[in-house]
Image (tube, helix red, strand yellow):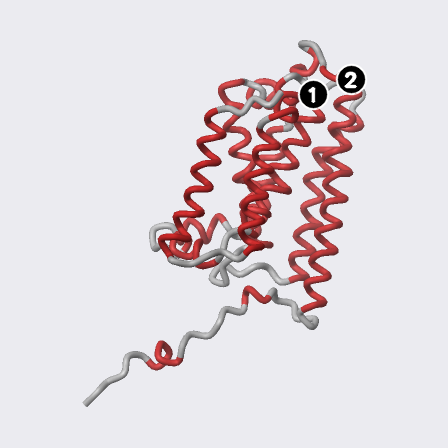
Amino acid sequence: MWEVKPTLIIALTLMAVAYASAAIALKRQPSTKQIAAYTAALLMLIGALSGPIDWLTRNRLFSAYIFQQMMLIFVVPPLILLGLPDWMVRPVMMNRMVEPVARFLTRPLVGFLSFAAVFTLIHYPPVCDRVCHVTQLYGWIRVVLLTAGMMLWWPLLSPLPEYPRMSYPMQIMYLFLLMIPMTAVAAPITLAESVLYMFYVSGPHPLGFTPMADQVLGGLIMWIGQGIYIMFVFTAIFARWSRTEDQEMPPINRAAPAPLHVLRGPSRHP
């Protein structure tokens, strides 16, 4: 069950090396919390994409497939963003070739709609049966999910004041609206009177679940699980808001003022 594919090892190694190399090159060190968050993100990727969860997913356990998706959307992207210091991200995101595209992709509406479109499409039964579970494409589906998750969470957890986070009230509204596409996908799966995905009835089923019971469990993980998770995030936002003395903007949006010599420009000597 603990098969770890070489591509996953290579990808995680590159992520770890890039993080350490950036710190060395810029001669700065992330905080302990940032290192812990980034390390947790890598460990969560290992847990989601290898071992029992991935084995059950590939062996026709729909509920494991949905749980894996929830980890790639709701757990890993926030941890990655919390683990990235502003000084590490700034050289990339403020590059003149990257910035115009990055500005567009990190807009709240673009991130929200992109995630909603991807999440809805991959759960449309013909697409799920013919694309999501094809061995050659399955890895790319997870990359797409992780990318959509990063775009979704950026407006809430942007590490850069140049790419400001949404105000606290807008963050709450954003998460509330997120429950709409999630429920729109999860409810039909949970309440369906027959198995929607033929992939899960075309072979042996692990853990003794019937395909129908497995589908209902997967729908509940998506429907109720995401609702509980979002309520925890609501609570965290309210707590952070209360700690900032009722100011609506997150502290990270208030960038430190430029040094006096930068504001005045270079000194001139006679």
Q: Nearer the viewer, residue 134 or 182?
A: 134
Q: Secondary structure at mark 1?
A: loop
Q: Nearer the viewer, residue 234 or 27?
A: 27
- The percent position of residue 20, horizontal first and vertical second, equals 43, 47
Q: Which residue is mark 2?
A: 209
Q: Quadrant of residue 123?
A: top right
Q: Is residue 32 above or below residue 216?
A: below
In the image, taking residue 226 as reference, residue 82 lies left or right, namely left
- The percent position of residue 192, horizontal first and vertical second, equals 78, 24
Q: Is residue 174 above or below residue 69?
A: below
Mark 1 crowd level (few <14, some 14–19, many ≥20, 10 Å Cα):
many
Instruction: Report, in whole angstroms, how far the alpha carbon at label 1 lies from the one at label 2.
Output: 8 Å
- The percent position of residue 53, horizontal first and vertical second, equals 65, 26
Q: Is residue 207 above or below residue 253?
A: above
- The percent position of residue 126, horizontal first and vertical second, equals 61, 20
Q: Residue at x 54, y 46 (%)?
A: 38
Q: Secondary structure at mark 2?
A: loop
Q: Residue at x 55, y 38 (%)?
A: 146
User: Which callout, 1 or 2, points at the residue further toward the start of the chain?
Assistant: 1
Q: Is residue 259 above or below residue 235?
A: below
Mark 2 crowd level (few <14, some 14–19, many ≥20, 10 Å Cα):
few
- Quadrant location of the C terminus? bottom left
Q: Residue at x 78, y 15 (%)?
A: 208
Residues at circles 1 and 2 in contact by the CB criterion of under 8 Å:
yes
Residue type indicated by callout 2:
Phe
- Give the number of the disc on residue 61: 1
Furthest-bottom residue in this view: 270
Say if residue 261 shows up in the picture: yes
Residue type indicated by callout 1:
Leu
